[in-house]
Amino acid sequence: MQFFVVILLLLRFQAAPTPIHPGENLTGEITSTNPQPEYSLTVNAPESIVVQLLPLSDSAPRFRIIDLSGFVLGEGAPREGETIITAAAVLPSAGTYRILVEGVIGTQYVISAGVGEIIPPPTPLVIADRVSASVETAAPVKRYILHGDGVLFFSVTAESAAAAPVITIYNSEGDVIALVGSAVQGITLRLPFSSAGYVIMIAHGGSSGIERYSLCAELANSTPCPAYEPPPEATAEPAGTPAPTLIPADACVIQPSGVVVNMRRQPTLTAEVMIQLPVEVTAPVLGVSPDGIWWLIDYQDFTGWVSSTVTTTIGNCQSVQTVFPN
């Protein structure tokens, strides 16, 4: 009898994941019978996503975006001055992913998941040719394809330990053969010969800024890669950096979160880019999209949309009106 009761209790706490679809808003609650609400999101191709959670009670929960193996792809946590908890993640392959919500029992919330840009096709890597590039929240992933007639040595180095990307290497069947988290600043891997080659994905690791890296591949007993040289430290502010704008006490404005931000004609990552906002500028907010993910702003005689995932708000933003895109 006791064994039967234990089984019932385990089943009670293992609620099936709730499917969530892109653009859908779902209400939820952390309860004693469901202390860690779980959602499942299925994609048909590698994509980037933005998950947002709006607390409806005093306590603010947090959430994790994970793959089926339990690897954490993104985390959302409360931040001072922000009412919506946001996290972006790169889903490296087609399949189903999980979103786990954690917090105080009795916490109510609204959660949404928006699919971003489809990950572009991989860029071929040239043996012994060092490549330097970067990923950021607005462009969170780059992919490369690597071929070599023999054993390969592949290395990646992040410029900053505080802003290192996530590195994933796939074989020709799409299986993950190496996964390096953002806590590792650099690594060298020995890859056996494969006639089909390898795909390397560099994904934003979740820092607040741009994550720069350098990578190179060489064949065993052949021309080595050029040595990695760290970039020189900046000694002065770039010329022409816009001065911060004075903000009225009752205004709501946005500022880029350490990255250059695209202003788009519509509130979607596939819409036309009208202009870019430099890191240190501010712009007044005219409205917010119905899903709460995009701000409608005015900047340099342009009116358009910027994503809340790459901006921070300043001032009184509680009463910003909802604007429905044309």
Image (cartoon, helix red, strand yellow):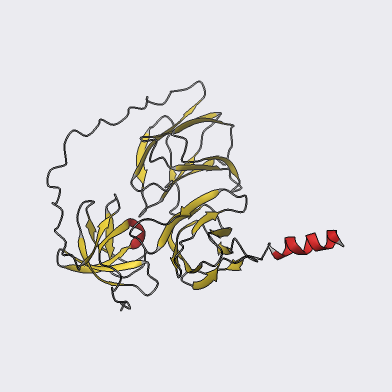
Tell me which corner region of the image, top left, top right, bottom left or bottom right, holds residue 326: bottom left
Question: In the image, residue 188 lies at what x, y percent?
Answer: 49, 29
Tell me which corner region of the image, top left, top right, bottom left or bottom right, holds residue 117: bottom left
- Residue drawn at (43%, 38%) of the image: 125
Q: Is residue 166 left or right of residue 324?
A: right
Q: Is residue 10 left or right of residue 149?
A: right
**Location of residue 136 with respect to 302 vertically, above or below:** above
Question: In the image, residue 202 lies at what x, y percent?
Answer: 45, 44
Q: Is residue 4 left or right of residue 146?
A: right
Q: Nearer the viewer, residue 248 or 321?
A: 248
Question: In the image, residue 93 lies at what x, y percent?
Answer: 54, 54
Question: In the image, residue 103 lies at what x, y percent?
Answer: 53, 59
- Residue drawn at (33%, 45%) of the image: 210
**Location of residue 173 with respect to 301 vertically, above or below:** above
In the rendered image, which quarter contains the N terminus?
bottom right
**Location of residue 248 with respect to 25 vertically, above or below:** above
**Number of marks drawn:** 0
Q: Residue furthest right?
A: 1
